[in-house]
Image: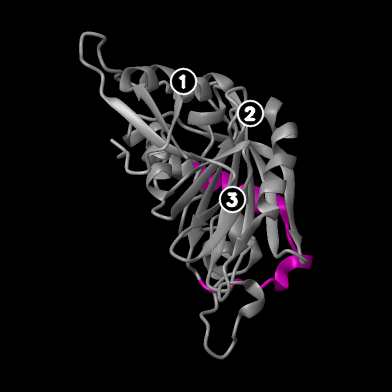
Amino acid sequence: MIRVIRVSAASIAIAVGFAGAPSTAQEPQAVQLNWQLGPMTAPIGDDLAEIDIGEDTIFLDAEGTRRLMELTENPLSGREVATLSSASEDDSWFLVLEFDEVGYVADEEKDDLDADAMLEAIRAGTEAANEARLERGWSTLSIVGWHEPPHYDERSNHMSWAVIGESNGHRTINRIVKLLGRHGVMTATLVASPDELVAATPVADVLLTNYRFRPGNTYAEFVPSTDKLAQYGLTALVVGGAGAALVKSGLLARLWKPIVVGIAALGAGLKRVFFSGRSAHHDPEAPIT
């Protein structure tokens, strides 16, 4: 089942706080996000992974996720593969999935993680990323601190943490889970307001228990003699995925991607803007325009 959601460009601009919202005298352009409603096994990437979702969850593919990121003032990484959210209009959280084909990330650092140093590196990277946000006329972001320090689950090969961010007086939290695979890392970013995070975290965690790399892509299937080995470890996953030498020197090759302002800062209101007047359509050919 495809959920086709149409909202006006003017409504989105007002809700998200875009500078230069369209004039009411102009004819607004329709925006569609083709959400798929569970239950289903949703494919993620090109035969890369999949996730089982129930009737209380909706799924957005890679193309739709990129559209959603643009609508909510978030720079595209080029690695977006899916978005998950609650089917309820009263919930505003989103779980954004991105895959980085960096190779196998060894977990030797699991007992030697320095949360304070990682937080400072994230702050530095976010300040640098703010320059790009300003160039696009977007709001800047500051890092308040940890909500949940980084920790690694050796059984599931998941690395998770939560960061508190602030923009335009609104605080929100990114909870990030890195799911390690044979050929790279899937990043699951939970976007929620601080008030909603307590309830959203266990829901997202349950969702991720139903995520799996497809056969041939699992962490346990790594072949040292032939497979690509990532040039960094667990610390770099948290501070932005830079190489080990750059992490030690405090420099970041890639900046932490903040996915906090556009969606969660406005709580359930933004979710209602996207879903208001929605209806279910059995129309998989409906285009995203």
| Cα distance between the residues tagged 1 and 3 | 24 Å
Q: Position of residue 232 (x, y in %)?
A: 57, 70
Vertical placement of 47 versus 28: above or below? below
Residue at the (57%, 24%) spot, across then down: 89
| Residue that badge 2 annotates | 193
User: Which amino acid, by three-letter code, is at mark 1?
Assistant: Val
Q: Quadrant of the C terminus?
A: top left
| Cα distance between the residues tagged 1 and 2 | 16 Å
Q: Position of residue 37 (x, y in %)?
A: 53, 39
Residue range of the region highlighted in magenta in the rendering: 103-126
Q: Nearer the viewer, residue 46 or 100?
A: 46
- Position of 194 with respect to 81 (left or right) is right
Closer to the observer: label 1 or label 3? 1
User: Which amino acid, by three-letter code, is at mark 3?
Assistant: Ala
- Position of 23 with respect to 124 (left or right) is left
| Residue that badge 1 annotates | 273
Residue 41 circle label: none
Examine the image and state in which quarter residue 133 appears. Answer: top left
Q: Are marks 1 and 2 in contact (CB under 8 Å)?
A: no
Q: Nearer the viewer, residue 289 or 15?
A: 289
| Residue that badge 3 annotates | 188
The earlier-in-sequence mark between 1 and 3 is: 3
124 is within the stretch colored magenta: yes
Q: Residue most toward the front?
A: 282
